[in-house]
């Protein structure tokens, strides 16, 4: 027997999902609660991309769970359970937004390129072409070195970060939420959002860069 | 040492995500790391990006309100009853 693994590998995750699906089909309430605790908050966050109202987003997430339960019989594990559930959320939210005539139309792929250059850091932070050391920092980004790790992960910073995410353009928000908040792989995000790997990375880069700026502003007055 | 070292700071900040994703070509990755080792400003910048990602990962752990939990359980029980 190998020593205990530090974390569950993909095979173990798949096994875990297979068990959960089987338990759910058998009507196991504990399995349902396990899934709800794992994904519900993220589902609401994702739904808010399409319906701005928080209460409506909660309804969408709830409706999506019903869709999950009803669709279980047809779930064939071609995609992971997680991607499958979130795709149901996206479809439910899009339908709801359409019904309410408040659709927020966007295409993540279009957004990745349409905006053109969107620098990670404001250009004026760097030395101009005629200066000494062109493209170098005018002054280094103020250090967060004095900020204790605990503070970074505590209430107020969470709030700042959460608001910064809410202010991202939809495609960037979608990718950042799935990758960095929900911890999805690049491959899973590309599948769920139907974007190319390169577009996924552009959106992630722009979104993350803005979040860093938001935190820098709050933590170091940058 | 001549300036710029590997690349400029302005170029580096645009490659951070590719660096962290492991999608930079080997030669570009070497220049990125060469610059990083020599530039405290960029080293701090990359560290701040890592911290930002870690902080975002903590947002997922919002707990479920009892009200919501009950509502979802009733969705589940209704579904069981009606198939």
Image (tube, coloured by chain):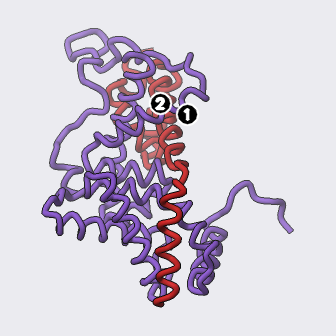
Count up the numbered dots: 2
The kind of secondary structure element at disc 2 is helix
Query: According to the rendering, which colour does chain A have?
Result: purple
> In screen coordinates, is A150 left or right of B28?
right
Question: Which residue bears the numbered disc 2?
Answer: A157
Where's residue B46, x and y in %? 47, 30
- At horizontal 52% and vertical 32% (from top left) the residue drawn is A155
Question: Which residue bears the numbered disc 1?
Answer: A153
- At horizontal 40% and vertical 60% (from top left) the residue drawn is A189
- Disc 2: host chain: A
Q: Pointer 1 and pointer 2: residues touching (CB < 8 Å)?
A: yes
Where's residue B69, x and y in %? 53, 62
> In screen coordinates, is B41 left or right of A105?
right
Where's residue B72, x and y in %? 48, 68
Q: CA distance from mark 1 to mark 2?
A: 6 Å
Name the quadrant of the C terminus of chain A: top left
Query: According to the rendering, which colour does chain B have?
Result: red
Residue at the limit of the structure toward the top, as seen here = A132
The kind of secondary structure element at disc 1 is loop
- At horizontal 33% and vertical 58% (from top left) the residue drawn is A57
Disc 1 crowd rating (10 Å Cα; few below 14, some 14-19, many 20+) is: some
Name the quadrant of the N terminus of chain A: bottom right
Residue A145, labelled with which disc? none
Q: Tell me where residue B6 sits by quadrant.
A: top left
Which residue occupies the foreground of this view, B74 or A39? B74
Q: Is residue A2 above or below residue A149?
A: below
- At horizontal 44% and vertical 88% (from top left) the residue drawn is A74
């Amino acid at each position: 027997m190998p020593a205990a693994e530090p974390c569950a590998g993909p095979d173990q995750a798949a096994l875990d999902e297979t068990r959960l699906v089987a338990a759910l089909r058998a009507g196991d309430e504990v399995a349902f609660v396990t899934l709800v605790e794992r994904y519900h908050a993220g589902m609401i966050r994702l739904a808010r991309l399409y319906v701005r109202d928080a209460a409506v987003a909660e309804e969408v997430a709830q409706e999506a769970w019903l869709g999950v339960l009803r669709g279980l019989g047809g779930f064939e594990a071609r995609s992971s359970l997680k991607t499958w559930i979130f795709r149901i959320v996206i479809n439910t939210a899009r339908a709801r937004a359409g019904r309410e005539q408040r659709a927020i139309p966007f295409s993540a792929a279009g957004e990745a390129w349409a905006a053109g250059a969107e620098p990670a850091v404001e250009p004026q932070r760097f030395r101009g072409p005629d200066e000494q050391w062109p493209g170098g920092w005018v002054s280094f980004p103020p250090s967060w070195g004095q900020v204790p790790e605990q503070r970074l992960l505590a209430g107020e910073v969470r709030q700042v970060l959460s608001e910064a995410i809410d202010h991202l353009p939809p495609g960037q928000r979608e990718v950042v939420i799935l990758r960095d908040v929900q911890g999805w792989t690049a491959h899973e995000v590309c599948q769920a959002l139907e974007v190319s790997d390169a577009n996924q990375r552009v959106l992630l880069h722009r979104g993350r860069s803005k979040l860093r700026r938001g935190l820098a502003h709050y933590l170091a007055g940058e | 040492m001549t300036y710029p070292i590997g690349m400029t700071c302005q170029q580096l900040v645009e490659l951070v995500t590719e660096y962290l994703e492991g999608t930079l070509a080997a030669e570009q990755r070497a220049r990125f790391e060469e610059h990083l080792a020599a530039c405290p400003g960029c080293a701090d910048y990359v560290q701040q990006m890592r911290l930002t990602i870690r902080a975002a990962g903590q947002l997922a752990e919002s707990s479920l309100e009892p009200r919501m939990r009950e509502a979802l359980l009733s969705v589940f029980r209704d579904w069981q009853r009606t198939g």
